């Protein structure tokens, strides 16, 4: 948590990670492809409570909470990424396919 001065709203650490899974060496090595981190901007809880109490005080309709804003930026420079990055499953394990079924990530390994 970061606070500039006692009367300022609190900024909480909040982030999102977005990435793709990829394989190389015929599915022997699995790794993150194009990982991105998001800067999350949302209305602070203190401000939200203040707005709601003010609206109630003056019999005004309470506004709906705005959706958070996300701004993604690359986590790893493409110039620093190598073919050896990732987790080696060993010579006897190879990933055939990666898919999502019933909300869960599934891997077919041979």
Image: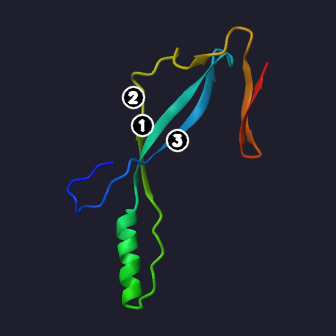
Return the residue nearer the eye: 9 or 76.
9
The reply to whether the C-beta atoms of the residues labelled 2 and 3 are less than 8 Å apart is no
- Residue ID for mark 2: 77
Give the distance between the C-alpha atoms of the residues marked 3 and 1, in whole angstroms. Answer: 9 Å
Query: What is the secondary structure assignment of the residue under circle 2?
Result: loop
Residue at 77% across / 46% down in the picture? 102
- Residue ID for mark 1: 74
Query: What is the secondary structure assignment of the residue under circle 3?
Result: strand
Q: Earlier in the sequence, mark 2 or mark 3?
A: 3
Q: Extreme front residue here?
A: 6
Asked whether, in this view, residue 91 is left or right of residue 75, the answer is right
- Residue ID for mark 3: 18
The reply to whether the C-beta atoms of the residues labelled 1 and 2 are less than 8 Å apart is yes
- Residue 6 falls in image quadrant: bottom left
Coordinates of residue 51 in the picture (x, y in percent): 37, 76
Return the residue nearer the eye: 69 or 3.
3
Coordinates of residue 95 in the picture (x, y in percent): 72, 22
Return the residue nearer the eye: 105 or 53.
53
Q: Earlier in the sequence, mark 3 or mark 1?
A: 3
Residue at 42% across / 34% down in the picture? 75
């Amino acid at each position: 948590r970061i606070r500039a001065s006692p009367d300022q709203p609190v900024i909480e650490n909040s982030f999102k990670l977005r990435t793709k899974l990829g394989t190389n060496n015929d599915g022997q090595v699995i790794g993150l492809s194009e990982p991105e981190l998001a800067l999350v901007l949302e209305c602070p809880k203190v401000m939200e409570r203040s707005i709601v109490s003010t609206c109630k005080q003056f019999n005004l309709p309470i506004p709906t909470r705005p959706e958070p804003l996300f701004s993604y930026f690359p986590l790893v420079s493409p110039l620093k990424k190598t073919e050896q990055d990732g987790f080696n499953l060993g010579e006897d394990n190879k990933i055939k396919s990666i898919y999502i079924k019933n909300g869960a990530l599934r891997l077919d390994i041979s």
